[in-house]
Amino acid sequence: MPTTDPTATDRTFDVGRLRELFPILAQRVGDKPLVYLDNAATTQKPRPVLEALSRYYASENANIHRGVYALSQQATEAYEGARGKVARFLNAAEPAEIIFTRNATEGINLVAQTFGRRQVGDGDEVVISTMEHHSNIVPWQMLCEEKGARLRVVPITDTGELMLDELASLLGPRTKLLSIVHMSNSLGTINPVRRVVELAQAQGVPVLVDGSQAAYHMPVDVQALGCDFYVVTGHKLYGPTGIGALYGRRALLDAMPPYQGGGDMIRSVTFERTTYNDVPHKFEAGTPHIAGAIGLGAAVDFILGVGFEAITAHERPLLQYATAALETVPGLRLIGTASAKASILSFVLDGVHAHDIGTIVDTEGVAIRTGHHCTQPVMERFGVPATARASLAMYNTTTEIDQLVAALTKVREVFG
Amino acid sequence: MSDLRELYQEVILDHNRSPRNFGPLEDADLHADGHNPLCGDKLRVAVKVDAGIVSDIRFEGSGCAISKASASLMTEGIKGKTLDDVRTLFDHFHRLVTDRTAPPDDSLGKLRVFAGVRDYPARVKCAILAWHTLLAAVDDTQDPVSTE
């Protein structure tokens, strides 16, 4: 890989040096260098995250919140320290507003099963949008089915932008929650979340924001956004799988019933009556993914160390470069051309199914995602069965984009 | 490129471009729907049976080159066969695309072009979808077939 990337304008951001922190990127696929462009599915892990995981297991492992011995206290401090790091990363008002989950999906399900089950009743409505990931559709469908409530869907434009007027008109006295994605995983669209929250607040509607894609591309300030809930997943933040976080406003979390029952979420248990622990522990039953949380803490530290200014200064021109490069490929059509978008290039190729594209570019070492990307309603909206999707992260280079484009010419050679 | 040509044989590309027996079948005796949620492939296989013999078969739907060509070549391969033959051919085809050690069975004829699929585990479902759907039609399964 070249150490002088033309998009790296910031003197402190050297993509070549950055790539050296990600051991997996040095791999080859057959005789080709790995070109990893499936970051929207999961990002690769830098050494500081790998080292935090191995350090925890090698020298800090103990169960938390229980032991009086030094090692347990050390593990507890590391785990709670990670909560503090995630709280700072999202600018939560306090660490107790951060609940560790398995992933963003679990964060949404937690809200649906606690806040949702208490707030949503017969004849009520939950509002989502066409561009939601299945994880922000199905939990609400399940809730609505159980409660006799109705799921309303905000439509999107041909470029993949949220129709704000339609959104405003869907909100009303029956709306009990608006759940919306910050950045679309299949279109790249960045939604105007601040504006969306204002519209919802004007109707007294609480808002959950799915930040799975946004949080590794742009700074997130939950207090500035004004949302009530925000979910992220660790493995898309250059952190481990199996760990995510739910931010919730303290007053809401305090009022919500627990999610799962078990150890750690209780204050006292008798057969007659159990009293629950305070937030965040009320929502963290059982031994949590301690190592994962510590790894996530290291991951958000790593991101902030690189800095969103540098990340944006690298990723934005890279997206422009990639967009222009893909537009030169004959018969290629981009799906998702919103004016505010980041790091996602979804496309279809005339006469070639996305799955065939994926197989052929893989033989050139290029890893992209093909299929519906867990957004079947988006595929239906654009009238395509599937798309091929290249998604970028801080370590991708213009050279890799060139390799993708070269691999796409192989597709044409095979299919004619 | 040579590896890719093993997968995307000329016969497969031809059947992808112009699938045979493609479209609805009027007065079908049996039919079933197949779905591969992974890549969005959807197809319907419809069969006419005359005295235990497949007298006509057509398919419709959308999918990748492998799944479309597989459905197309399958319809050609089983027309005129008995329902028992269909089940035997299914087994041979399944082995062809999944078992790297077994030599292709001669009874598969033209269908042997799919031998390359065994080197692409992610694509086995594409090649086998039409066959699973056909089997469901023959066994008169009511639920749509899914590869997941």
Image (cartoon, coloured by chain):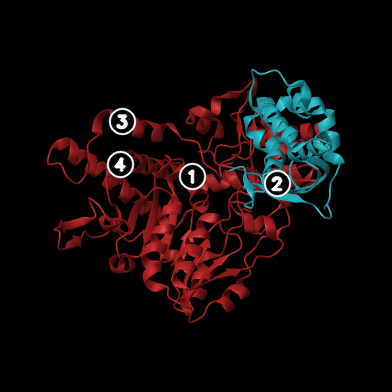
Chain colours: A red, B cyan
Q: Residues within 10 Å of mark 2 (few under 14, many from 20)?
A: many
Going by the numbered disc 4, the residue's amino acid type is Ile
Q: Which mark is residue A55?
A: 3
Name the kind of residue labelled 1 in the image. Lys
Residue beneath label 4, please? A290
Name the front one of labels 1 and 4: 4
Q: Residues within 10 Å of mark 1 (few under 14, many from 20)?
A: many
Helix, strand or loop at disc 2?
helix
Q: Amino acid at mark 2?
A: Ala
Q: CA distance from mark 4 to mark 2?
A: 50 Å
Viewer-closest of A358 and B16: B16
Query: On what subunit does the disc labeled 2 rest?
Result: B
Residue drawn at (24%, 33%) of the image: A60
x, y percent for residue A165: 62, 75
Confirm whether residue A98 shows in the render. yes
Residue A413 appears at what percent x and percent y? 82, 31
Q: Chain of mark 3?
A: A
**Above or below: residue B25 compared with residue B76:** below
Dots 3 and 4 on the same chain: yes
In whole angstroms, how far apart are the C-alphas of marks 2 and 1?
Answer: 42 Å
Q: Quadrant of the N terminus of chain A?
A: top right
* C-alpha span from label 1 to label 4: 18 Å
* B27 lies left or right of A48: right
Query: Which residue is pictured at 33% across the width and 68% down the height?
Result: A252
Callout 3 touching callout 2 (CB < 8 Å): no
